[in-house]
Image (cartoon, rainbow, N blue to C red):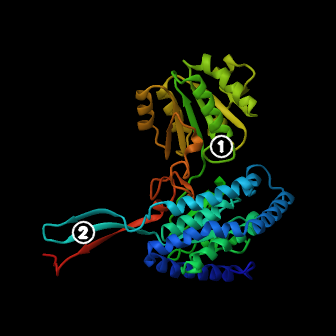
Amino acid sequence: MDATQPDDTGLQAAMAALGQRARQASRRLATASGAQRSQALAAMPAALERVRDALGEANRADLAAARDAGLEGPMLKRLEVTAKVFDAMRRRLDEVAALPDPLGRVLDGHIRPSGLRVSKITVPLGVIGIIYESRPNVTTDAAAVCLKSGNAVILRGGSEALRTNRVLAEAMITAVSQAGLPADAVQMVGTSDRAAVGAMLRLEGLIDVIIPRGGKSLVQRVAAESRIPVIKHYEGLCHLYLAADAPEAMAVALTVNSKCERVEVCNALETLLIDSAAAPRLLEPVVSALRQAGVTCRGCERCRVILPDLEPATEADWRTEYLAPILSLRLVDGIEAAIEHIHTYGSGHTDGIVTASLALAERFCAAVDSASVMVNASTRLSGGGDYGLGAVVGISTDKLHARGPVGPAELTSTKWLAVGDGHLRT
């Protein structure tokens, strides 16, 4: 669509036209063969490689403009397409292409006593709308995941990444077209007008699902304004509980990795819970390792009895997703107190336990109601790639329709088929 629109009426009309094209494309995708979709997916990594130089130039321009506009911290870091990010984008395209086809799977099938043959199969959702900030990798991930699941996708990235996303979207559209599939299967909203988000959220009947990826304020706006079902998570307030028997070396390594591998992402650790029985042996080495990694540690009053130089943690800290090198620490009296803290303050994203006890691990897994529950593993592993999904289009803390990483299988629905031989209702 055009980069500028004369008024809200014109913008809504332009968005509706984009949605109508996506709807037509989705109908063609729904009947396309798995081989044809695989051909398009196989062409995506090469298409991305061909635009490497143009992508670098566009991303540098976006970064410069973002800095001039005062963007900083996690948003700026997520915007940058480094060589490492580029390689990861290409690798995820390969991984999605290699996944089993999620369409046409028979989930249930039986023959009724009357002879009526009944089956339940997986089908595409239709048109997916994705609204996101900074992260250019969402553009390629979404194109691949949606195509794999037979869905058309409408992408609305942030204005700070407009140049970068245009290059990426054009590369993905080229791959789709080369396979003989409709170019409108992948479309990007080309305007930086913020009103486009509101217009997109009013396209009920043309878009089947909206997925927001960005800060809490964006997700809240989408959830409040959308007339379309939303798959979302508001924040990743992730916890790790070091049980009384947690091995010291593992506890330190998992805490540091969960917090420090990337502090600005939704599955980074924000609160560390340490069993009071283990605090005398674990608190000091854990804090020392975190400080060496540049993390500011804020402790509860009981933590500060052991380490008086800890910054004091307040009630607000237990409710804060820092997305920064800051970690809150709290001593708890046993696993039930840890579970209660997570139930009280957690966001249902990713929470984990470090323990040598199978019984404690089983109790934690059964009681903690989060999209991902980790046992002796970093919270940073709760994502599509580490779960074998390749690229994903987000992580959901909802329970309807998807929960956890949202990959190709999560972007499918079902339909029932009934085959008879002149069967009548009697």
18 lies left or right of 163: left
Give the crowd class for mark 1: few <14, some 14-19, many >=20 residues within 10 Å.
many
Above or below for 301 versus 324: above
Q: Is residue 28 visible?
A: yes
Amino acid type of the residue tagged 1 in the rendering: Glu
Report the Cα–Cα distance between label 2 and label 1. Answer: 48 Å
Above or below for 348 versus 190: above
Query: Residue 3: x and y, percent?
Result: 74, 78
Give the crowd class for mark 2: few <14, some 14-19, many >=20 residues within 10 Å.
some
Precedes in sequence: disc 2 or disc 1: 2
**Front-lying residue, 327 or 219:** 327
The quadrant of the image that shows the C terminus is bottom left
Residue occupied by mark 1: 321
Q: Residue furthest right?
A: 68
Figure quadrant of residue 19: bottom right
Number of the front mark, 2 or 1: 2
Amino acid type of the residue tagged 2 in the rendering: Val
Query: Residue 22: x and y, percent?
Result: 55, 78
Residue occupied by mark 2: 118
Q: Is residue 228 visible?
A: no
Q: Residue at x 70, y 28 (%)?
A: 289
